[in-house]
Image (spheres, rainbow, N blue to C red):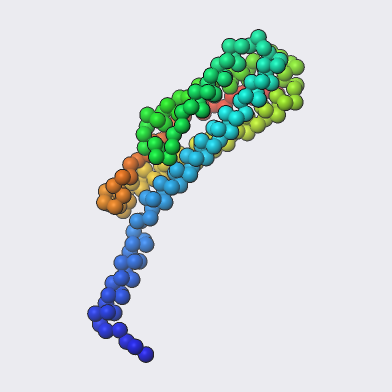
Amino acid sequence: MTTLSLPRARAVVLMSLIGLLLSACGYNTIPTLEEQAKAKWADVQNNYQRRADLIPNLVATVQGYANQEKDVLTSVVEARAKATQITVSADDLSDPAKIKAFQDAQGQLSGALGRLIAVSENYPDLKSNQNFLALQSQLEGTENRIAVARRDYIEAVRAYNTALRTFPGVLWANTVFRGSKPMAEFTADDAAQTPPAVKF
């Protein structure tokens, strides 16, 4: 059986202690929370894209019954085009102006969709159309998914931003992870928080 010399034993103990301290000191917290927030943002974008993908079919269905509602149909198409043009990458999450532009475009689309759904009240044949009912149902489900994804993103950003400002994360953020900036919070306006009314 070999025995370690005293200096070598001290080095092994010291390295073990350093490894233990680093594993419990929060070094991995900031990158982990940052990646979680980015993943939650991807969910938000995915659900907004799902909604945008439903809109052409919804507009086409309404147009077949309510072609005289050109203004409403045009506003939905234009709002969708604007909303899909504004993208925010994971690297842009610390830019409040980009998040605000994204929110505003999505809010305008939500308002336009609300007006489109309201138009359906004037057309009993449209309200009973199976395609329209299916699209309404999918839209309602998507709006619920958007709400959940936004909530999850907000919570992930809160955890990340808190880690940047509290001990020991503040030490790591100011030394090792100097590029770490707080992420912009996603606070939707009233129009975006209220999904379009879906009435059957």
Residue 116 versus residue 184 in the image, above or below: above
- Residue placed at 63% from the left, 11% from the top? 69
The percent position of residue 189, horizontal first and vertical second, equals 46, 26
Judge by depth and name the residue closer to the eye, 13 or 79.
79
Looking at the image, residue 113 sits to the left or right of residue 66; the answer is left
Q: Quadrant of the N terminus?
A: bottom left
Residue at position x 42%, y 51% from top?
32
Q: Residue at x 29, y 52 (%)?
A: 176
Q: Is residue 173 left or right of residue 57?
A: left
Residue 65 lies, in percent from the top left, at 71, 15
Residue 165 seen anywhere in this rendered image of the structure: no
Q: Is residue 36 above or below residue 142?
A: below
Quarter of the image where one finds residue 135: top right
Q: Kindly indicate the quadrant of the structure image that contains residue 14.
A: bottom left
Residue 110 appears at what percent x and percent y? Answer: 54, 24
- Identify which residue is drawn at 27% across, 75% down: 11
Q: Is residue 58 left or right of residue 89?
A: right
Question: Which of these two is toward me, 75 or 16?
Answer: 75
Q: Residue furthest top?
A: 68
Pick the residue in front: 107 or 178: 178
Asked if one can make out residue 76 in the rendered structure from this viewpoint, the answer is: yes
Q: Position of residue 4 (x, y in %)?
A: 30, 84
Of all residues, the one furthest to the bottom in this rendering is 1
Q: How many marks?
A: 0
The quadrant in which the C terminus is found is top right
Residue situated furthest left in the rendering: 7
